[in-house]
Each structure stands twice: as C-alpha cells, then as structure tokens.
Image: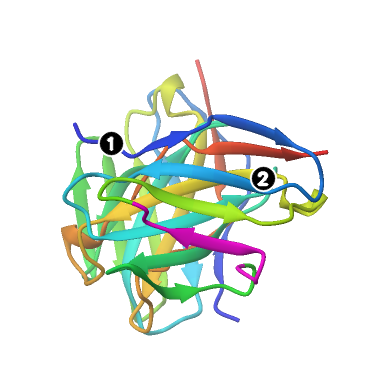
Amino acid sequence: QKEVEQNSGPLSVPEGAIASLNCTYSDRVSQSFFWYRQYSGKSPELIMSIYSNGDKEDGRFTAQLNKASQYVSLLIRDSQPSDSATYLCALRGTDSWGKLQFGAGTQVVVTP
Amino acid sequence: EPEVTQTPSHQVTQMGQEVILRCVPISNHLYFYWYRQILGQKVEFLVSFYNNEISEKSEIFDDQFSVERPDGSNFTLKIRSTKLEDSAMYFCASSEARSSGRTDTQYFGPGTRLTVL
C-alpha cells in the first residue's frame, strides 16, 4: 500500500513565525507533489506544486522536495491567523492516470 | 479565475435511494476526477475520467457507482443504492492533463455533502 504520512498536529505557531510541515511517502517513483490547504468544511485549495528536487518559493510559502529521502515539506513564513487550516500533502505516481494520493493532513493553528 | 462548480451543496437521502452529484469542470480541462472525504478522514480517490471513459478507479468505486459526461460541460457521479457509509463530502476535480508540470494540477470544486439516513 502506497502511503503518504503527515503529522496530524495540531501545530501551534505564533503569529509572524515560521510553520514547518513535513510529509513522507513510500512510493519512490512518485512524480508530482502538491500542497493543498483545507479549511474546515471546505474543499482542498492548491497552495504549491513541486516536481523537481530542491526548493520552490511562492510568496510566503516554500516547498522543498527530496526524492532520495522521499519527503516533501512546506514552510509558511510570517504566519497569519488566516493560515490556520489543515494542510494536505498529495502526490501522483507515474503509474497513475492522475490519481492523487493524500496524506491525512497537518492541522496548523496560528495564535495571535 | 475559472473554477469547478458542484451541485447540490448538500444532499440528504434515504438509504437505498439513488443520488446524482453534478459537477461542471473548468472549461479547457480534459481530465476529471471524483474524490470523497468521510468526516475526519483523508481525501480518497474514487475515479478518473478522460475521453468519455474511466481511466482509473479505486476499490471504493464498485458497481454502485458510475460516472458520466452527459454533455459538453457536466460531469456526474451516480450512486445507485446509497448506504449509510456513503455519507461523506464528495469533491469533483479537473486538470488540463495528467503528466507532470503545471497542467496536471487538479483544481477542486466546493464539494457536495451527502448525508444518507
């Protein structure tokens, strides 16, 4: 069974600080990696996609991918109360017709 | 900004009844998906659809489920005889393509909350 693992949290982060979220996966041939944000009762909303090893920055968000170690991480800089949500790691394997496999998500709580 | 839309937002049905959940994917997208999320659990893949046929399905997607693109815009999920355990949030998603790169990003609709009594 291919797995995507995340710490469930909650991860409590003071406003203005950096939130660091990690995700590990077991399918070594996974190709596409995504971070989604999900507010309670709402649908997943794309934050970042990453395909190559290294860092990718978009505004306050930085995704990091290390395929050799099979992990992908997300940093949220200058955390705001509006960042309080569950962050979902998702990946697509090479043998997939687009199927995304999701982790259970990490709940982030940004405290003022 | 184009978006995926879904109707209804909430559907309540009796066990054994048929339900049809509707989705309008983003207009230039070619790949369509259904996922579900039982309360408090992971988002789970159900099915992917391309070129008017199912391209991949999960173990959850048994004979009680079917998908259809009845016209050029709608994409539907039918559950023939609902069970209590079908109660979940159902999300439709679409992408331009399935290969790596910006085009395989899946955009999710707001979801339909299905409650089976």
On the image, the x and y values in percent for residue B45 come to 52, 63
The part of the chain drawn in magenta is B61-70
Question: What amino acid is at disc 2?
Answer: Ala
> Observer-nearest residue: B44 or A20?
B44
Q: Is residue B108 above or below residue A25?
A: above
Is residue A71 on the magenta stretch? no
Q: CA distance from mark 2 to mark 1?
A: 22 Å
Which element type, helix, strand or loop, lies under badge 2?
strand
Q: Quadrant of the N terminus of chain B?
A: top left
- In the rendered image, residue B83, in percent from the top left (x then y), is placed at 79, 53
Indicate the amino acid at tag 1. Answer: Glu
Residue B62 x/y as whole percent: 65, 71
Q: In the picture shown, does residue A43 fall above or below B92?
A: above
Q: Position of residue A94 (x, y in %)?
A: 33, 81
Residue at (21% x, 54% y) in the render: B29
Sort mark 1 into few (<14), some (14-19) or many (20+) by Cα contacts within 10 Å: some
Is residue B91 visible in the rendered image? The answer is yes
Crowd tier of the residue under label 2, counting other residues whose Cα lies within 10 Å: few below 14, some 14–19, many 20 or above: many
Residue of label 2: B88
Residue A102 visible, this orientation: no
Lower position in the chain sequence, tag 2 or tag 1: 1
Residue corresponding to mark 1: B3
